[in-house]
Amino acid sequence: MKIPLTPIRFLRYACEQFPNRVGVVCGGQRFTYAQFADRAARLAGALITAGAKPGDRIAFLGTNCHRLLEAYYGVLEAGCVLVPLNIRLGAEELAFVLNDAQARFLFVESIFVPLVESFRTTVASIETSFLLDGQPQANWLASRNYDDLLSVSPPFQCDFMQIDEDSVAELFYTSGSSDRPKGVMLTHRNVYLHALSVIAAGQTSTSTIGEMSCKTVMLQTIPLFHANGWGTAHTITVVGGTHVMIQHFNPVEVFRLIEEERVTTCAMVPTMVTALVNSPARRNYDLSSLQIVIIGGAASSPTLVKEVEEKLGCTCISGYGLTETCPTLAKSQVKSDVTVEGEQRYARQAMTGFAIPGVELRVVGPDGKDVPHDGAVMGEIVARGDVVMEGYWRQPEATAAAMEGGWFHTGDVATVDRYNYIQIVDRKKEIIVSGGENISSLEVEKVLLGHPDVYEAVVIPVPHEKWGEVPKALVTLKPGALAREDDILEFCRARLSHYKCPRSVEFLASLPKSGTGKVLKRELRQKYGTSSQSTVA
C-alpha cells in the first residue's frame, strides 16, 4: 500500500488521537487539537470559496501566531502552496518576493498594513488581501478579517490520497548572500519525512532528554517564516505536543511563558540564548520545566553551551540546517559510543553535529573527494537525503549548480572527525585568507566569546597592504564591562596562533541582525571596506 507522504496527515492524526489536548497556546487563547484542525479546515474552505486553485501561492505576512500555524495545514488542504514572508524585509524586497512567487492571495497582520500599502500597487498578481487581526479599514482589504472569514466558511478536508507527494507544499525565500533571495521549493514529501527524521534523531543519544512526545511543550521562539521555525510546525503536531506562540522575542516574556506553560523545549539562535543567560530577570522565574535548548541558525560556542546548562538548568545542544533542507541536517547530542565529560562535553555539544536519520553528509575537498576524518582538514559540506529541496523556484540553472553531482552543496566549510561529527569553520565566502593562510572567523569568534566581558562578537576581514586581508573583531560588551582593545587582543593571543588573531578590535553598542536574529556579517563587511569574496584555497 502506498499512501502519499503529506504533512496534512500530521494534523489529521493529532486531531484523531489527541482531540481534547491543548495543541496551541497563543496570547490568551488556547486551542485543542480538535479546534486547531477545525480552524485549519475552515481556512481551506475559505480559500476555495475565494477562488483559490490547486498550486496557487498563498502568502502570509505576520508574527508568530496561531493563525500562521494554521496556515501550514489549511493552505495545503486547499491544494495551495504556503509562502511565509520574512517580516524584517523592506518594501522593495517583499514586492520582489511576492512578484517572483506570483502570489495570488495575501494575509497580513495589522501592524504591517502600512508597509504593504507602500508597495502593493507594484504586485499585480495579488488579487485579494485579508487582514489577520483587527477590523479592515483600508479599501484594498477584504471586508472580513481572518477570524470572521473562518466563522462563515465551511470546513474543507481534501482527499489526501489524490495529493502528489512530489508537488510543492511550501515556498520559502532565502536570505542568503546573493543580491536577490531565491525561492526554495519544499515538497509534501520533503516536509513529511523531515518531521519523522527529526523525531527519530531524538533516539540517537544516551539521554531521553530532547525526545519528542505528547509531553513536549515547545516555545516557538524562532519565527515560523524561517523554514517552519526549524520544522516544529510539523514535529510538535504529529506527536501531540503543545505549541506555545510568542510574537516577539523578549527575555522576560520568554521566562514568563516557560514558567506559566511549563515549557520543555526551545530552539533559538545564539543571539537569543545569549540574551537569556545574561538577563538579570532570569532569577525571578521558575525555569525547572525546561529540558533542552537547541541552538541553530549560526555557530554556537562551548562557552555559550556551558552557560545555558549552568544558568538555565537544562541540556543544550546545537542543530544545523538550511532553508534548502527543511531545514535540519544534523544535531550535536552525544552519541552512545562517544564518551566525553566536562569541558569536552560542552565542546562536543557546540559542534555542528552528525547527520540525522535519512540524511547523508560528506565533507569534500576541491576534487570532490572526502577529506580525512581527522577534525583538521577543511572541505565543503554536501548533503543528500529526503529533506533536500526540489529546487529553486523558476531558477533551473541555480538548482543545477547547487545539486551538482547529485549532492546539495551547502557552501559551508567544515571539518569532520573520526566519530563523523562535523564542525563548520565558516561559510565558503567568509573564510579569511591572510597571507595565503585560511582563517576561520568562527574559530576566532568562539575564542572571543570565551572572554568574560564579551557579550557578542563578530570577526570580519579588512584590507591590509601586506597580507591582503586580516581579521578584525567587532565586539559588544556585557553591561558594566570595562575591557579594552589590548585586553581582548591579549586574550586571543594566549589562545590562538598569531596569524589568526584579530589585528584590531572595535566596540559597538549592538550588532545588526536579521529577522531570525542572525548577525548580518555582510553589512559589516561592506561597512568596513570588503565584501570578502575569498574562497578556500
Image (cartoon, helix red, strand yellow):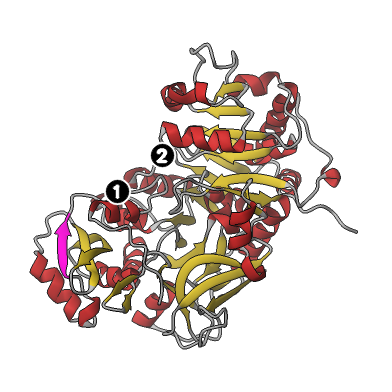
Identify the residue shown where x is 75% and y is 44%: 12
Say above or below: 119 vs 459: above
Identify the residue shown where x is 40% and y is 77%: 537
Q: Is residue 507 visible?
A: yes
Residue 270 on image: x %, y %: 37, 59
Identify residue type, mark 2. Arg
- Reading the image, the residue beneath label 1 is 512
Q: Single out the residue that lies furthest toward the front.
A: 465
Secondary structure mainly formed by the magenta segment: strand
* Tag 2 secondary structure: loop
Residue 127 on image: x %, y %: 63, 22
In-front residue for pair 49/323: 323
CB atoms at circles 1 and 2 under 8 Å apart? no
Residue 231 on image: x %, y %: 58, 53
Q: Residues within 10 Å of mark 2 (few under 14, many from 20)?
A: few
Please tell me in which quadrant of the rendered image residue 67 appears: top right
Task: Decide which of tag 1 and tag 2 comes sooner along the chain.
Answer: 2
* Tag 1 secondary structure: loop
Q: Taking 184 as reference, is 134 left or right?
A: left
Q: Which residues are magenta?
A: 503-507
- Reading the image, the residue beneath label 2 is 88
Q: Taking 13 as reference, is 244 left or right?
A: left
The quadrant of the picture occupied by the N terminus is bottom right
Q: Taking 207 as reference, is 13 left or right?
A: right
Identify residue type, mark 1. Pro
Q: Residues within 10 Å of mark 1 (few under 14, many from 20)?
A: few
Separation (CA) of disc 1 from disc 2: 12 Å
